[in-house]
Image (tube, rainbow, N blue to C red):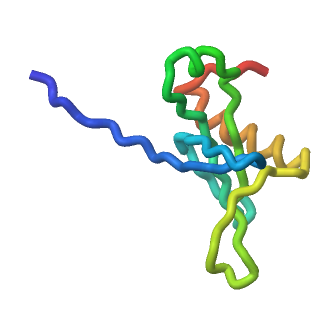
Amino acid sequence: MADNMDYERDTITLMDEEGVEHEFEIVDTLEDNDTEYLALIPIFDDPQSSLDDDGELVILKVVYDEDEQEEFLEPILDDAEYERIADQFMDRLEEFFDFEE
């Protein structure tokens, strides 16, 4: 008899510019040059929204306030940095996801 193991997702809720909350699953984290990055995929309540999603991986950088007490997530604005980090995540996650170039 197979063990019935529950799978718990590591999730995070983020608010967009309009104040709407969106839930994401953290699928991977990595550290590069003393900076932490998160790879996220959206979680949808209804199956149709999941099917309609473009499947793009959301990559965010972890930054800290001046006192290094609070952490925030922000987009990667530097194109070279984004490409470097995206390539690392794609290499790490290609076993689990089908990526399109």
Q: Is residue 93 visible?
A: yes
Q: Is residue 25 above or below residue 78?
A: above
Closer to the camera, 82 or 40?
40
Residue at image location 61% in from the left, 45% down from the top: 21
Q: Is residue 39 above or below residue 99?
A: below
Where residue 42 appears, x then y in whole percent? 59, 34
In this rendering, would 41 be left or right of 65?
left
Q: What is the residue that sits farthest to the left in this orientation?
A: 1
- Which residue lies at the image location 59% right of the left edge and 20% below the top edge? 49
Quarter of the image that includes the N terminus: top left
Please say if 43 is above or below 66.
above
Q: Is 35 above or below relative to 42?
A: below
Q: From the top left corner, tell me how far across and down residue 46 is, in percent.
A: 50, 22
Residue 31: where, in percent of width, then height? 65, 58
Q: Furthest residue to the right?
A: 79
**Would you say 57 lies left or right of 51 here?**
right
Displayed quadrant of residue 2 = top left
Left or right: 77 in relation to 45 = right
